[in-house]
Amino acid sequence: MTNAPYAAATTDALALALEHVADGVFTAVPSDEGRWRLSTANRALARLLRRDLVGHHLCEVLPRAHWRRLRLQLQELGRVLQPVEFEVDADVDGSRLQHLRIRLLPVTEGSEIKQVVGIVRVQTETIRIRREYMGLRDRFASVFEYAPYGVCFVGTNTRPVMVNRAFQKFFDRPLKQMTAESIVGLIHPDDQLVFAKALDKVLDGSRSYDGMEVRLATKGEKGLWVSVSMSLARDYAAGEPYAIVQAVDISARKASEAELLRLATQDHLTGLYNRMVFDQNFRAALTNAKRYKRQGAVLFIDMDDFKSVNDTFGHKAGDAALKAVADVLRKTMRETDTVARIGGDEFAVILEEVDTQQASHKVEHIRTALEGLTVTAHGKTVQVNASVGVREFDGRVDSCVPDDILNAADKDMYARKEAQKAQRIAS
């Protein structure tokens, strides 16, 4: 037996709840000629349509275009006898477009619909925010993909998560391969350690970097110079931090810098170091010799009768002779030795960490290499001769004054030159 007071109270409570929900709720019953008459409607729906609704037909309270759309959905509801949900942009109040989500639920008796319950939810603001978000996302994706500089998102496992076109263009590798390994593997081997340490600091949030210059492991031994900026970002949806790595190609600037350095430090004719570099390296070598109690030597090389070569065969022959002597010195010396052209036909070599015997051996080696050296000028063979002087220095006992040591090597060279002349005259 139904408790009538309890049932009445429940009905009143439901009615009160419907009056205060944000969604519009209505019930409609079929009327004559396929029309539907509103039997109930809550305040939210009345506010949306700005008029009294109960007792009126849907076709009377809705604009014609919206009523046609709703009638089609009601027909579909009568066919499937299952809830129907759809969305529509409607100017129901005549002032602005509203985006509505409408859900129709049939109340049936057998296969016949006796009543329809409708729930109308205004989603205008939600859709607006969603569309703005989608627009921002699309713009971000476009900026990311077509940025003129390389951009890469790196996860905490140091593997690239996203890579844009410019970044991928740096490498001749498939995208799948690039994202399957640590980004450190994309850095030139000589720069991997410094890059890996910097990336660790970015990922742990301790610092960011701007303008760090490293080389990428592209084709060729030299690699591609880029300026890298790195900072930490956080994916608020997943809660995982990631590093944003931006790379700008600076290979052209690096090439220009290398060319300027070459022009500033190399002799333009022979490609050897110039006098400025020789003086700097000589001072550094003497400082190290005194600090670490080491020995070393300086060689002074001067070409014999160079003026007569220029006067007789021309300056091109003289230039060829200078280049020939430079090539001999370059091939004879160690990579750690400083070989320089310090004057018109004068060359000098800094030998670090050699004793007197080793220095004397190097002098004889150069003399042997220069013997029989010739160049061709105007169809004629020109003999090239040079004299070599040496002066050792010892950081344990010498004062190591650069000018004194170089002058001593120069004097030794002239003494040997005069001795060779006397020997040739005597023979």
Image: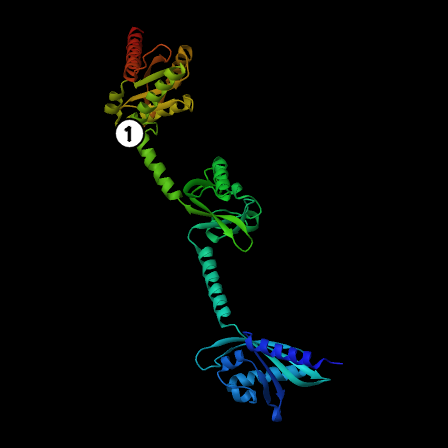
Q: Residue furthest left?
A: 311
Q: Position of residue 256 (x, y in %)?
A: 35, 40
Foreground: 61 or 393?
61
Q: Is residue 5 above or below residue 260?
A: below
Q: Position of residue 257 (x, y in %)?
A: 35, 38
In which quadrant of the rendered image does the C terminus lie? top left
Q: Is residue 372 visible?
A: no
Q: Is residue 339 above or below residue 58?
A: above
Q: Is residue 425 above or below residue 322?
A: above
Q: Please count the marks in the image.
A: 1
In which quadrant of the rendered image does the N terminus lie? bottom right
Q: Position of residue 6 (x, y in %)?
A: 68, 78
The residue shown at (48%, 53%) is 165
The residue shown at (44%, 40%) is 214
Q: Amino acid at mark 1?
A: Lys
To which quarter of the image does residue 253 belong?
top left
Q: Which residue is mark 1?
A: 316
To which quarter of the image does residue 25 belong?
bottom right
Q: Is residue 407 visible?
A: yes
Q: Is residue 148 left or right of residue 35?
A: left
Foreground: 368 or 77?
77
Q: Is residue 175 above or below residue 44?
A: above
To which quarter of the image does residue 28 belong?
bottom right
Q: Residue furthest right?
A: 1
Q: Residues within 10 Å of mark 1 (few under 14, many from 20)?
A: some
Foreground: 53 or 384?
53
- For label 1, the SS is helix
